[in-house]
């Protein structure tokens, strides 16, 4: 008689002997599991009473034993001056074209015109036919902007005195102002007024860029050289924005 293969749906009944052996195996396995669990519990208790592991070596403070927290100081507002080593922050205005120059001490109230650099590398002079006109180097810094702005004017013309005829009277501490196209007025205070020979003019000192907003007022000065039809010196007034 051929043996019938068991299918998952038809599992054969085990014999009494096999059933006994399975029960003994089950009892032994349960007993071993109980021993294993008990051993694990004892091992955990030993660990809790033994030395701490490196990860748990750091002390853990409870709220009742921890020191009182140190109050965090409230930050004190720092001004721009103290934030830059107690040096005052540079004052300046955004770029805008100048429209009118006012120098009360010498009665100057004059409009501006644009000036450029000529073919010889020198700053052009304002038109000589207008005695009440000043010019500014339009490709450079505008008055009030960070850097050095240049404003030039004639001391006289062939017919009469011109806008900067009294510029030599300005002294340290004198003030003047520039109206601008943005509606603001840039106010300046004179630092010094110095005369330089034209053939030894200190370009770097007069025109060099600066970290603050500064202005140079420039006109002719000294003796008139009839051979070259020009004055031999330049008067430069150094001023800064206030």
Image (tube, rainbow, N blue to C red):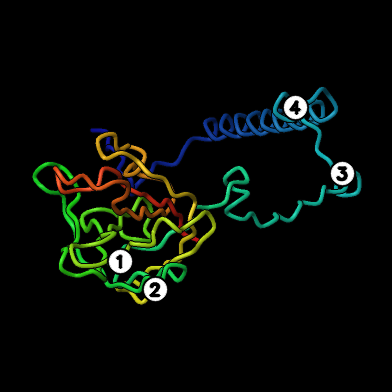
Of tags 1 and 3, the one toward the viewer is 1
Q: Which of disc 1 and disc 4 is earlier in sequence?
A: 4
- Any part of residue 100 in sight: yes
Task: Identify the disc placed on residue 204.
Answer: none
Of tags 4 and 3, the one toward the viewer is 3
Q: Which of disc 3 and disc 2 is earlier in sequence?
A: 3
Q: Which residue is mark 3?
A: 66
Task: Identify the disc placed on residue 39.
Answer: 4
Q: Which residue is mark 1?
A: 163
Q: Are marks 2 and 4 in contact (CB under 8 Å)?
A: no
Callout 2: SS: loop
Quote the CA–CA distance across marks 2 and 4. Answer: 89 Å
Residue 44 on image: x %, y %: 76, 30
Q: Quadrant of residue 160?
A: bottom left
Quote the CA–CA distance across marks 4 and 1. Answer: 109 Å
What's the residue at 30%, 66% (across, down)?
163
- Any part of residue 1 in sight: no
Q: Mark 1: give few (<14), some (14-19) or many (20+) Cα within 10 Å.
A: many
């Amino acid at each position: 008689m051929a043996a019938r293969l068991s299918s998952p749906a038809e599992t054969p009944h085990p014999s009494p002997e096999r059933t006994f052996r399975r029960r003994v195996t089950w009892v032994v396995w349960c007993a071993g599991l109980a021993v294993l669990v008990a051993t694990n519990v004892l091992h955990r208790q030993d660990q809790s009473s033994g030395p701490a592991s490196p990860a748990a070596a750091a002390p853990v403070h409870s709220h009742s034993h921890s020191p009182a927290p140190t109050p965090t100081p409230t930050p004190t507002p720092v001004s721009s001056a103290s934030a830059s080593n107690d040096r005052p922050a540079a004052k300046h205005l955004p770029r805008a074209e100048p429209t009118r120059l006012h120098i009360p001490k010498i009665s100057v109230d004059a409009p501006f015109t644009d000036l450029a650099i000529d073919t010889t590398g020198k700053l052009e002079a304002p038109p000589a036919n207008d005695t009440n006109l000043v010019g500014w180097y339009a490709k450079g810094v505008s008055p009030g902007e960070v850097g050095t702005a240049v404003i030039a004017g004639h001391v006289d013309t062939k017919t009469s005195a011109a806008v900067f005829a009294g510029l030599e009277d300005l002294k340290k501490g004198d003030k003047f102002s520039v109206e601008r196209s943005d509606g603001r007025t840039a106010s300046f205070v004179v630092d010094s007024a110095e005369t330089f020979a034209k053939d030894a003019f200190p370009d770097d000192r007069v025109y060099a860029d600066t970290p603050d907003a500064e202005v140079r007022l420039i006109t002719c000065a000294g003796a008139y050289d009839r051979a070259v039809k020009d004055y031999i010196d330049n008067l430069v007034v150094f001023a800064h924005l206030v």
